[in-house]
C-alpha cells in the first residue's frame, strides 16, 4: 500500500527546523539525516540534504532544496490541541521568531504555517444547531490565538 509523506522544502535550515518541530509534540523524533553525495542546486557533497522525521506519529521529510521556493499559508500543519494550555504552549513556541495570523494560524520562524486549534472547536463546528455554529464561527473570526473560554461562551450564547 502506498504511503504519503509530506516533504517540506527549506533553504539550508531543514535539520534545524526538523529538530525544532520534533521538540514540540510527543511521539516525535529524527529518523534519519542524509547528506548530499553529489553537487546539486540545493547543496554540495557533505551538506545536509534530507531529514526524515516523525511528528506526532506521522512521517515527514525536510529537504534543503535551496532558495527557489518559499512556504505560503496555502498549506499548513493543523494541530488539534487537548486544551487551552496546549494551545498556549504551542502558540508561544511557534510565535518565537514567527508571525501571528488570524483564526489560530501562526507562521513559524522557518516560514511554515500552523493552525493551533483546540479540539473542542472541531466538535462545536460539527454541532447540528446552526445558530451555535454561527456564533462560534463569528467569535473565532475575531481571534488571533484561539481562546477556548471565549469560544465556549459564544457557542453557548453567553
Image (tube, rainbow, N blue to C red):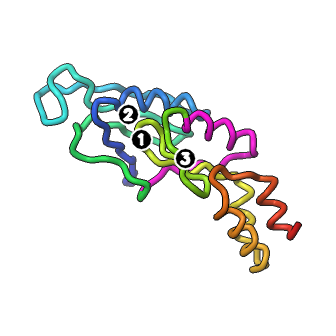
- Residue marked by disc 2: 52
Q: Within 10 angstroms of label 3, few (less than 14), some, or many (20 or more) residues?
A: some
Rendered image: mark on residue 104 = none
Mark 2 and mark 3: Cα distance apart in space: 27 Å
* Residue at screen point 86% across, 67% down: 156
**Disc with the residue nearer the chain's start (2 vs 1):** 2
- Residue marked by disc 1: 60
Q: Secondary structure at mark 3?
A: strand
Residue 74: x and y in percent read: 41, 59
Q: Secondary structure at mark 1?
A: strand
| Above-or-below relation of 107 to 53 | below
Q: Nearer the viewer, mark 3 or mark 1?
A: 3
Quadrant position of the C terminus in the picture: bottom right
Q: Are marks 2 and 1 in contact (CB under 8 Å)?
A: yes
- Residue marked by disc 3: 100
Q: Are marks 3 and 1 in contact (CB under 8 Å)?
A: no
| Above-or-below relation of 138 to 18 | below
Mark 2 and mark 1: Cα distance apart in space: 6 Å
| Above-or-below relation of 89 to 135 | above
Q: Secondary structure at mark 2?
A: strand
**Disc with the residue nearer the chain's start (3 vs 1):** 1
Question: In the orientation shown, which residue stands out farthest toward the top?
Answer: 46
Residue 114: x and y in percent read: 52, 48
Whether 134 is among the magenta residues is no
Amino acid at each position: 500500500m502506498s504511503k504519503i509523506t509530506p516533504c517540506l522544502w527549506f533553504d539550508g535550515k531543514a535539520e534545524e527546523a526538523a529538530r525544532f518541530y520534533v521538540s514540540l509534540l510527543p511521539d516525535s523524533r529524527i529518523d534519519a539525516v542524509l547528506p548530499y553525495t553529489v553537487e546539486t542546486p540545493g547543496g554540495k557533497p557533505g551538506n545536509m540534504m534530507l531529514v526524515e522525521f516523525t511528528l506526532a506519529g506521522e512521517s515527514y521529510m525536510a529537504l534543503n532544496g535551496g532558495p527557489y521556493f518559499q512556504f505560503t499559508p496555502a498549506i499548513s500543519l493543523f494541530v488539534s490541541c487537548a486544551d487551552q494550555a496546549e494551545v498556549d504552549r504551542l502558540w508561544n513556541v511557534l510565535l518565537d521568531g514567527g508571525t501571528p495570523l488570524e483564526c489560530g494560524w501562526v507562521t513559524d520562524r522557518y516560514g511554515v504555517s500552523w493552525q493551533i486549534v483546540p479540539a473542542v472547536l472541531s466538535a462545536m463546528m460539527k454541532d447540528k444547531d446552526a445558530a451555535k455554529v454561527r456564533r462560534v464561527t463569528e467569535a473565532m473570526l475575531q481571534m488571533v490565538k484561539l481562546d477556548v473560554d471565549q469560544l465556549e461562551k459564544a457557542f453557548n450564547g453567553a
